[in-house]
């Protein structure tokens, strides 16, 4: 699967997509393929505050439980409720159906620290 | 070929078949509705299985034969120290003087039991280099939590209420951050360096006046000794924090190096790992905690002490964090650990460590040509291979672990530690012979060759077990947790 060019990426394998001044966040295709079949996704609630580089939830696969690290600081305004009953979406549609949260961010400068698709591909090619 | 019947006990049931016979009723029959209220009386049949005594025997004997334990085969489950549990432990634990006492008896009538507790505390104090030991915690994670609560009480007693952070290396056992969280701390992850050891610079950048403690296991989860431990201790102590030692890997250093001498302030031990308490099947475990004199004031109470020639339960410990386990902990496991320590003696315990380390290094070097070994220095009691070479050929670590079942082995710990891709964490322990190690090594080599030549046999393993490859994803997403008796389809019952 190719890495969508219109998204930005964190070192912790989250993607970020700008939509009308808000930011949609999920995990990458690479992340889900490393984790294997996802069986549970734990997400914050609308209104919770995310802090950049700090855990905001977790994904559990048959192998392991991994924390989700916030790529940006901001307030959660939307949460993907579908993942509660259909965690397999993370494997099937990491960039579309399995978005996790939408946030309103505090500091646009944090966006500059995220990677482009090319940079992310380079990082995960190792 | 398995001849064992896979039917559930419910499926063996035949209406009217019974496995008991009761004498005729010789007391007046009482109507149950006259003595119990309506809500307490069952309205549906219990539908217990109707089987003969022989059916029951065969069913449960067949189930017990499916078990794998140290008594049936090699069990190199990394980080778990699945060593042999000597049977003399069981004999001693069954002495009537121990097995027939009650925890509510007056201490004057259980002096022997208290003496064992006291002596075991003394032995563990000597082994760990910690002056004070409590045996109360029920197992490892409970020991971690108990020690952290004592550290927390210590900081609070000093008015240091801003110490809210516990540092944990990224290779730590998952229980470490969990215990810190349950004890009310925030956890901060410390990174590993390229040698697989704690990155000292990262540690220095993360300690400060809010540091309550650093939790560390040494050797770490890669089986590598943290060489910079004295400097790490100085860094943490320099900012007023405490050092906590996770004793899960004590089998690697017992009688060779002591956590107390490395600068640790609190230590937990797993009597069910290092000291041959039975492990698995519910144990129970036992997770004693040793502390410095400074922390001893906060020990769980009662504290077993010796006054002249008598042993007492001291409840007068004003700053104690309180009792952490009903009665006095898992006393039956103390007896097994005590028996082990006394039957091995100091030289025996030293030999345990030497053979545990020798066995692990022997296996690691023999397997090194066939699997990736991310950290190549000598290991301690366990080592971690990576299955990334095999993954490229289409067989993942999970597949190889399943294939080991066909050879009659319990697989190693897999996908842990998290900082090794496709990890296989192997801990042979000291109690296995060279022949057993060689046989396991040959099985691993064969599996590596199969991955190159015929990966399907690995991908589809296991082939010889009663049950083949399970759908782990479905089991996690849609678990079936109880038997439901097959019902007739609804439309048939309606007609």
Image: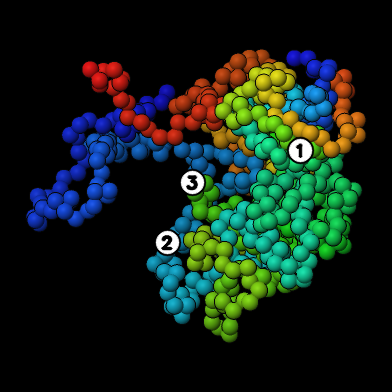
Q: Quadrant of the C terminus of chain B?
A: top left
Residue found 63% across the figure and 22% down from its top: A89
The secondary element bearing badge 2 is classed as loop
Marks 2 and 1: in contact by CB < 8 Å?
Answer: no
Residue found 46% across the figure and 38% down from its top: B67
Position of residue B41 relative to residue B131, above or below, is above
Distance of mark 3 from mark 2, alpha carbons? 19 Å
The secondary element bearing badge 3 is classed as loop
Q: Which residue is mark 3?
A: B281
Position in image of residue B221 (x %, y %): 72, 44
The secondary element bearing badge 1 is classed as strand
Residue found 68% across the figure and 52% down from its top: B181
Q: Residues within 10 Å of mark 3 (few under 14, many from 20)?
A: few
Q: Are marks 3 and 1 on the same chain?
A: no
Q: Nearer the viewer, residue B425 or B169?
A: B169
Position of residue B405 relative to residue B240, above or below, is above
Q: Are marks 1 and 2 on the same chain?
A: no
**Mark 2, chain letter?**
B
Q: Which residue is mark 1?
A: A75
Position of residue B345 relative to residue B360, above or below, is below
Does residue B70 appear left or right of residue B192 in this picture?
left
Disc marking residue B94: 2
């Amino acid at each position: 699967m190719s890495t969508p060019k219109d998204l930005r990426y964190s070192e912790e394998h989250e993607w970020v997509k700008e939509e009308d001044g808000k930011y949609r966040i999920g995990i990458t295709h690479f992340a889900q393929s490393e984790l294997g079949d996802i069986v549970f996704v734990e997400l914050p609630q609308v209104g919770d505050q995310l802090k950049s580089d700090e855990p905001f939830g977790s994904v559990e696969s048959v192998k392991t439980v991994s924390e989700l690290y916030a790529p940006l600081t901001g307030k959660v305004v939307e949460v993907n409720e579908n993942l509660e009953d259909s965690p397999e979406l993370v494997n099937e549609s990491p960039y579309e159906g399995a978005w996790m949260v939408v946030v309103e961010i505090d500091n646009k400068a944090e966006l500059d620290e995220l990677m482009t698709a090319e940079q992310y591909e380079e990082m995960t090619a190792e | 070929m398995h001849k064992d019947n896979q039917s559930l006990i419910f499926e063996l049931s035949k209406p009217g078949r019974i496995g008991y016979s009761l004498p005729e009723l010789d007391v007046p029959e009482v109507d149950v509705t006259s003595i119990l209220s309506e809500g307490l009386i069952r309205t549906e049949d219990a539908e217990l299985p109707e089987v003969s005594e022989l059916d029951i025997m065969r069913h449960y004997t067949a189930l017990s034969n499916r078990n794998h334990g140290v008594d049936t085969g090699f069990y190199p489950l990394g980080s778990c120290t699945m060593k042999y549990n000597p049977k003399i432990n069981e004999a001693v634990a069954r002495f009537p003087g121990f097995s027939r006492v009650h925890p509510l008896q007056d201490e004057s009538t259980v002096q022997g039991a208290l003496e064992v507790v006291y002596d075991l505390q003394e032995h563990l104090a000597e082994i760990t280099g910690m002056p004070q030991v409590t045996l109360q915690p029920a197992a490892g994670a409970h020991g971690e939590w108990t020690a952290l609560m004592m550290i927390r009480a210590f900081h609070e007693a000093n008015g240091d209420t801003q110490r809210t952070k516990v540092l944990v290396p990224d290779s730590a056992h998952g229980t470490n951050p969990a215990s810190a969280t349950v004890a009310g701390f925030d956890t901060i992850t410390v990174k590993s360096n390229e040698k697989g050891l704690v990155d000292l610079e990262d540690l220095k950048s993360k300690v400060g006046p809010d540091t309550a403690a650093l939790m560390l296991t040494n050797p770490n989860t890669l089986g590598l000794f943290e060489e910079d431990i004295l400097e790490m201790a100085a860094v943490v102590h320099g900012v007023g924090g405490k050092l906590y030692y996770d004793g899960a890997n004590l089998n690697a250093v017992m009688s060779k190096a002591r956590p107390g001498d490395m600068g640790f302030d609190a230590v937990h031990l797993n009597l069910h790992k290092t000291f041959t308490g039975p492990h698995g099947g519910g144990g129970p475990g036992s997770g004693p905690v040793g502390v410095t004199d400074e922390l001893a004031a906060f020990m769980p109470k009662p504290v077993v002490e010796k006054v002249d020639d008598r042993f007492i339960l001291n409840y007068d410990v004003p700053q104690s964090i309180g009792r952490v386990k009903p009665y006095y902990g898992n006393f039956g496991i103390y007896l097994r650990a005590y028996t082990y320590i006394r039957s091995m003696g100091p030289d025996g315990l030293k030999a345990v460590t030497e053979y545990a380390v020798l066995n692990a290094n022997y296996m690691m070097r023999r397997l090194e040509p066939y699997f990736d070994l991310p950290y190549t220095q000598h290991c301690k009691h366990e080592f971690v291979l990576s299955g990334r070479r095999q993954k490229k050929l289409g067989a993942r670590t999970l597949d190889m672990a399943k294939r080991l079942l066909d050879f009659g082995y319990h697989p190693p710990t897999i996908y842990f530690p998290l900082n090794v891709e496709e990890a296989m964490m192997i801990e042979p322990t000291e109690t296995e012979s060279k022949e057993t190690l060689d046989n396991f090594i040959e099985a691993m080599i064969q599996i590596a060759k199969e991955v190159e030549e015929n990966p399907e046999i690995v991908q589809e393993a296991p082939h010889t077990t009663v049950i083949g490859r399970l759908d782990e994803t479905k089991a996690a997403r849609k678990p079936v947790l109880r038997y439901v008796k097959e019902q007739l389809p609804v439309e048939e019952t309606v007609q």
